[in-house]
């Protein structure tokens, strides 16, 4: 959890990011730590011929009970990258744009795009 429903992960109507983080932490509080988690991105590249190629990007970490950092959005303040001892919200944009699930997905898509468009 929350998986595909991350933007709607709260019983509260009109919930914001803080509400969703709070709901997640409430659901995890009685579970043993570490609370392993990952962000996932899937990119599909469709060609006019109908061929579709799919690539993925994953960023592995863990959920922590206390928010850290002011950058990012969503679950970034509670998503810790243990090897850096920083949350996604504590990373600078340049660093985050190399490590995030979206960045890794795009990096995995680049060879396909280069092959399709040359370069």
Image: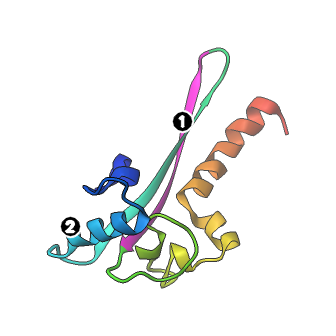
Q: Quadrant of the N terminus?
A: bottom left
Q: Nearer the viewer, residue 83 or 8?
A: 8
Q: Picture coordinates of residue 47 (x, y %)?
A: 66, 22
Relative horizontal placement of residue 1, taking residue 46 as reference (left or right) = left
Label annotation for residue 54: 1
Label annotation for residue 19: none
CB under 8 Å between discs 1 and 2: no
Q: Picture coordinates of residue 63 (x, y %)?
A: 35, 73
Q: Measuring 59% from the left and 20% from the top, which residue is drawn there?
A: 51
Magenta region: which residues? 50-62
Q: Measuring 20% from the left and 67% from the top, which residue is drawn there?
A: 27
Q: Measuring 59% from the left and 66% from the top, which residue is drawn there?
A: 99
Q: CA distance from mark 1 to mark 2?
A: 32 Å
Q: Nearer the viewer, residue 10 or 29?
A: 10
Relative to residue 84, is residue 8 depicted above or below? above
Q: Which residue is mark 2?
A: 27
- 48 falls in the magenta region: no
- 51 falls in the magenta region: yes
Q: Earlier in the sequence, mark 1 or mark 2?
A: 2
Number of marks: 2
Any part of residue 69 in sight = yes
Q: Main secondary structure of the magenta part?
A: strand
Any part of residue 79 in sight = no
């Amino acid at each position: 959890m929350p998986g595909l429903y991350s933007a709607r992960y709260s019983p509260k109507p009109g919930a914001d990011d803080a509400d969703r983080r709070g709901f997640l932490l409430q659901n995890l509080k009685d579970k043993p730590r570490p609370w392993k988690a990952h962000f996932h991105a899937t990119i599909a590249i469709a060609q006019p011929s109908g061929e579709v190629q799919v690539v993925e990007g994953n960023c592995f970490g863990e959920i922590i009970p206390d928010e850290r950092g002011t950058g990012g959005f969503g679950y970034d303040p509670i998503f810790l990258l243990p090897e850096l001892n920083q949350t996604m919200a504590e990373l600078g944009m340049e660093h985050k744009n190399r490590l995030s699930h979206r960045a890794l997905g795009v990096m995995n898509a680049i060879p396909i795009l280069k092959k399709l468009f040359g370069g």
